[in-house]
Amino acid sequence: MRKNARIAVTGVGAVSAVGSNNAAFLNALSTGTSNFGPSIRHELDFDSVVCEASEECFREHGHDELDSPTGRLCLAAAHECITNAHPSDAGKPDGLILGTSTGGQAMSEAAILALVDGKSLPSYNYRGQGSIASPARLVARDLDIRGPVQTLSTACTSAANAIAMAITWLCSGRCNRVLAGGGDALCYTTLTIFHLLELTGPTMCTPFHQDRKGMTLADGAGFLLLERLDDVVARNQIPIAELYGAGMSSDAYHMTAPSEDGAGAELAMRRALISAGIEPGDIDHINAHGTGTSLNDKAEARAINRVFGKDVPVMSCKGLTGHAIGGAGGIEAIASIYSVMEGRAFVNVGASEPASDCPVSLVPAGGLQLGGSPVIISNSFAFGGNNTSLVFGTPREVR
């Protein structure tokens, strides 16, 4: 056991509506723009504005018994992560933790709709394709991951919790290289639930804006390759970032709404700082959960203000990518890592000035230079008061 092992990030992989690879994601963050526009789904009794990923974001494979849109999306991000790992010759992952809220739900929906319509059932296996665990099983099989494989489903914190859980696997010696993150593809169940909760808006989401109308649901997946820092240094390699620590809380305030004062979010951020061994003043930038809903943005902003004051620049990726639910924490962890690597806070797309009920400072158009070796906190908050914060920075040997 290596209880106090430090955790290195040696690879990242993101696929989303802004593009099928890391380069497209970084370009969208850097410019504050992308080549996609939100689309409208008309299949249900209501129209829903969403951010859909292109077909190339859904990787083909030969494991039909585990097939699902979420699985193919996660597989694309996982391959992107492994392909771009530094170094690439250190060996394949020996553990996988995958967060998702839908799993194979889209395949179950197709089977149910066919049954209701009196049509022939498609080739479908609930325990395979329809399972919440089918994306993890697909990724593990395709990448030949022979160690432990875990599925987490905690709504919008799923991928962030997967990354936090990887710390324990590495510190305990259970694994040497863990692929951690998650993803979700759009499905009818997700669209309907958020519509009925009146959380979606008629236009692209605008996090922290005075006139924010609601969230924009999206396809997306993001994975990190994590190792013990000592092992990476022993190979004479410098990782792309270090995961300093993680903090979690579960305030159980309400099934679907955060407490107005953001008490659970505050506790997660304070625990992340303690885990990282740093003070609030050491944080240079906050990658917020920032969904663009009235309650979430207000609660998160108040929590941020109590922990960090009003001077730390804040942004949310969701004005670009939309909200990928189970995959959001992975995508936004990667955005935070790019902020570390680039020494820059990326623009908060959708608002440059915060709403009157959001006491934070937003990253303006054009972004902000942070200087050398910034430390970033990435927030993910979910239904049921489930909150997770991750802290990333430059590996401290080279700070």
Image (cartoon, helix red, strand yellow):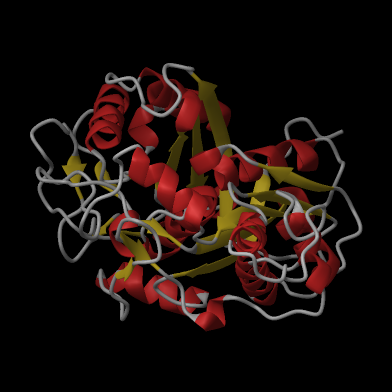
* Residue at the image position 91 percent from the left and 59 percent from the top: 146
Against 345, is 65 above or below? Answer: below
Most extreme residue toward the right, as rendered? 146
Q: Is residue 174 above or below residue 136?
A: above
Q: Residue at x 24, y 55 (%)?
A: 348
Name the image quarter holding residue 299: top left
Q: Is residue 44 visible?
A: yes
Q: Position of residue 331 (x, y in %)?
A: 49, 58
Closest to the observer, 309 or 159: 159
List x then y, in percent, for residue 161.
60, 39
**Residue sitting at x 71%, y 59%:** 135
Q: Relative to 270, does residue 203 appear above or below in the rendering?
A: below
Residue farthest to the front? 118
Task: Give coordinates of residue 17: x percent, y percent.
Answer: 42, 71
User: Looking at the image, which is closer to me, 276 or 294?
Assistant: 294
Give the vertical position of 109 relative to 80 (above or below). Answer: above
Q: Nearer the viewer, residue 276 or 258?
A: 258
As drawn, is 19 to the left or to the right of 85? left
Identify the residue at horizontal 24%, vertical 60% (top origin).
Answer: 204
Q: Quadrant of residue 355?
A: top left
Give the side of residue 22 with respect to residue 114, left or right. Answer: left
- Measured from the top left, where is residue 40 in percent x and y? 31, 68
Q: On the picture, is 21 further left or further right than 264?
A: right
